[in-house]
Structure formats: C-alpha cells, structure tokens
Image: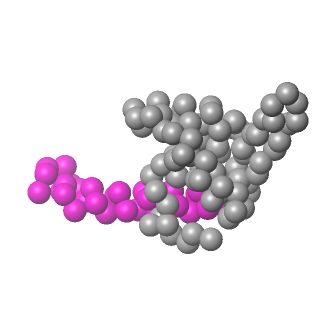
Amino acid sequence: MPSDISDYSILELQALFLLSKKAMHGYELMQLLGMKRKKKVTAGTLYPILQKFKKNGLIKLKSKKGKREKKTYAISLKGRKELKKAGNELVGFLNELFTEFYCPKCKVKL
C-alpha cells in the first residue's frame, strides 16, 4: 500500500477526495474531475486509478444488476485514513514550499 504523498498523483488524491464526499459512478467522478481540473479526464485514465484503489482497499465497489450493470464507488475506512495522511503530508509540503519562496513575516517574495 502507498505510504506517503509521493505515492499518489494529484489526480488520484482528487479522485479519493471526491469519493470521500459521496459515493458515485465512474462517469460522474470523471465529469467532476474534469470540471475541477479544467481538463478532460478519460476512462482510460480514471478506471486504472479506481482499480488501484480497490486493490489497495481504499474504496468499496457496489454493483447493481439490471439492464446495464451499474457500479458505485465509495471510499472505505482505510481510504479515509490514507486520504487524511496524504492530505496532511501535502499540506506540510505546500507550507514548506510556500515558506521557501515567501517571507512568513512580511509575505514578501524572496
């Protein structure tokens, strides 16, 4: 299982974050990611990420049988813990990056 922020892409973190807000179908997730990123996210990009998450126990998959099988993805407890850990690491990194280029006292670019 990934153990630090460097094991995730920004797209993966965004996908896991959106799934932490609500369970959804892959197509809906693809559309939301595209809107957030202002760049189209394809099925060929998203579904391998969802497979990786499922393999690592970060999401749960519910299937509803019918005319067409509908799959709904939801974050698991393990996924929530991993998202929190990765989010904390990302915030720490961004803070470090910010302070490298800006004076924390006067906010002047160095």
Q: Is residue 2 left or right of residue 65?
A: left
21 and 69: which is toward the camera:
69
Q: Which residues are magenta?
A: 81-110
Q: Position of residue 48 (x, y in %)?
A: 59, 53
Locate the C terminus and report the quarter of the image it occupies: bottom left
101 and 7: which is toward the camera:
7
* Circle count: 0
Quarter holding residue 53:
bottom right
Query: Can residue 69 be seen here?
Result: yes
Q: Which residue is at a point 56% across and 36% down the rendered structure image?
A: 30
Q: Which residue is at a point 62% across and 71% down the rendered structure image?
A: 1
Up/down of 8 relative to 33, above or below: below
Q: Which residue is at a point 81% across and 36% down the rendered structure image?
A: 69
Q: Position of residue 63 (x, y in %)?
A: 83, 41
Q: Position of residue 49 (x, y in %)?
A: 58, 53
Q: Which residue is at a point 56% across and 63% down the rendered structure image?
A: 85
Up/down of 3 relative to 99, above or below: below
Quarter holding residue 77:
bottom right
Q: Is residue 73 left or right of residue 47?
A: right
Up/down of 108 relative to 67, above or below: below
Per the picture, the main secondary structure of the magenta-coloured stretch is helix
